[in-house]
Amino acid sequence: MLMLPMQNLDVFKKNYLVVGLNDEQVSEIASLATFRRLTAQERLIRAGDQGCDLFVILDGRLNVLTPDGDKLSEVGPGSVLGEIGLIDARPRAADVIAIGLVDVAVIPAGELRRRMNQNREMGFVILANLARVLCGRLRQANEKLDELYDKTTDSWDRAL
């Protein structure tokens, strides 16, 4: 892995993780990152693996898949992956596979946690950003579960 190329710093600044941080704080977070390039069909994250590094997509697109291969989403530049592992340090929950050529900033979770602890104001902003996004995803998941439940209940009622 290589250091994050400077031309990618503008894309890095657009990820939700650093919203509300000043330029110096964003640069501090970016300085932790290394650069990785993936080719088509290369796996970035494997469900079940240990690991809690954070990934910021700089260029390209990736599929996020359930362990049994169902597509959850497609993500691109500015997206952040691995935030659940950053928080709970448990095994990865999904597979993430490059669709084509993909450039990624890899932020070591341990180092990011240390910086967040050293600078509590910055840490609070990052955690608040993570919480907002994860709450949004939870709301979407709840809505999908409700829709599935309604469909199942409707089908069952019609069968009687």
Image (cartoon, rainbow, N blue to C red):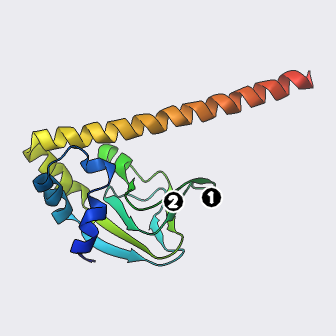
Graded by Cα atoms within 10 Å as few (under 14), some (14 to 19) or many (20 or more), the crowding at tag 2 reads many
Viewer-nearest residue: 13 or 146: 13
Mark 1 belongs to which amino acid?
Answer: Gly
Viewer-nearest residue: 58 or 3: 58
Mark 2 secondary-structure assignment: strand
Q: Can you say which quadrant of the picture contains the C terminus?
A: top right
N-term-proximal mark, 2 vs 1: 1
The residue under the point 15% across, 44% down is 122
User: Residue 8 at x, y = what percent?
Assistant: 28, 69
Q: Which mark is residue 69?
A: 1
68 over 19 or under it: above or below: below
Mark 2 belongs to which amino acid?
Answer: Asp
Residue with the most extreme right position: 160
- Left or right for 2, reference 50: left
Q: Are marks 2 and 1 in contact (CB under 8 Å)?
A: yes
155 over 13 or under it: above or below: above
Q: Which residue is mark 2?
A: 95
Graded by Cα atoms within 10 Å as few (under 14), some (14 to 19) or many (20 or more), the crowding at tag 1 reads few
- Left or right for 12, reference 90: left
